[in-house]
Image (tube, rainbow, N blue to C red):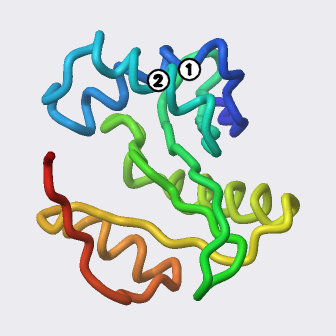
Amino acid sequence: MSFHFKIIDKKNINSVIPLVQKLNGSKVSDAVLKQRFSEMITQNYECAVIYDDEKLIGVCGLWFCTRHYSGKSVEPDHVFIDDDYRGRGLGKQFFCWIYNYVKAKGFESMELNTYVANSASHKFYFNEGFKILGYHFLKKL
């Protein structure tokens, strides 16, 4: 196995949809995801991926912004590693690559959301040094 990490070319963004569908349990159709990703790539968004040779096995969206309380910040979003590759330390390697990538771009902080029921992700992020600062609220309009 030869793992490599990179930022996916925006023209290939739809290749991450199958992994995002696994993360979300197919709650959003492929058509809607294609439309949303086509908008996202025009905003302050990039998508980091993991390949095992030529097979796409991991994804992490990156939203870039400046916040008054944390400065130049990046928000990882829809982080997912294929089930067959979990438990191998790949998430830690992926985030190490992401930390180096965003620091090289001049970003100084990272914050993220994770689903309340996803206790495995909570453990991972605590182990990565993240702290809980508040709650994330959502209201559909």
Query: For the point 76% across and 69% down, which residue is it?
Result: 107
Front one among 2 and 104: 104
> To which residue does mark 2 refer?
16
Q: Is 79 drawn above or below residue 40 in the view shown?
A: below
Report crowding for label 1: few under 14, some 14 to 19, many 20 or more residues within 10 A (C-alpha): some
Q: How many marks?
A: 2
Side of 130 where 28 appears, left or right: left
Q: Quick check: can you spot residue 48?
A: no
Residue 61: x and y in percent read 52, 44
Of residue 113 and residue 90, the one placed in the foreground of this image is 113
| On-image quarter of the N terminus | top right
Q: Do callouts 1 and 2 mark residues in contact (Cβ within 8 Å)?
A: yes
- Which residue is the extreme one toward the front? 141
Q: Amino acid at mark 1?
A: Ile
The percent coordinates of residue 136 (x first, y second) are: 26, 71
Give me the residue at 66% from left, 21% from top. Answer: 10
Of badges 1 and 2, the one in the foreground is 1
Q: Which mark is residue 13?
A: 1
Instruction: Give the amino acid at mark 2.
Output: Val
- Whether residue 41 sits left or right of residue 25 in the image: it is right
| Label 2 environment density (alpha carbons within 10 Å; few <14, some 14–19, many ≥20) | many
Quarter location, residue 6: top right
* Residue at image point 58% right, 49% down: 62
Element marked by disc 1: helix
Q: Is residue 31 left or right of residue 62?
A: left
Residue 134 in the image, given as x and y percentages of width and height: 30, 86
Q: Is residue 36 above or below residue 6?
A: above
- C-alpha gap between disc 1 and disc 2: 6 Å
* Element assignment for label 2: helix
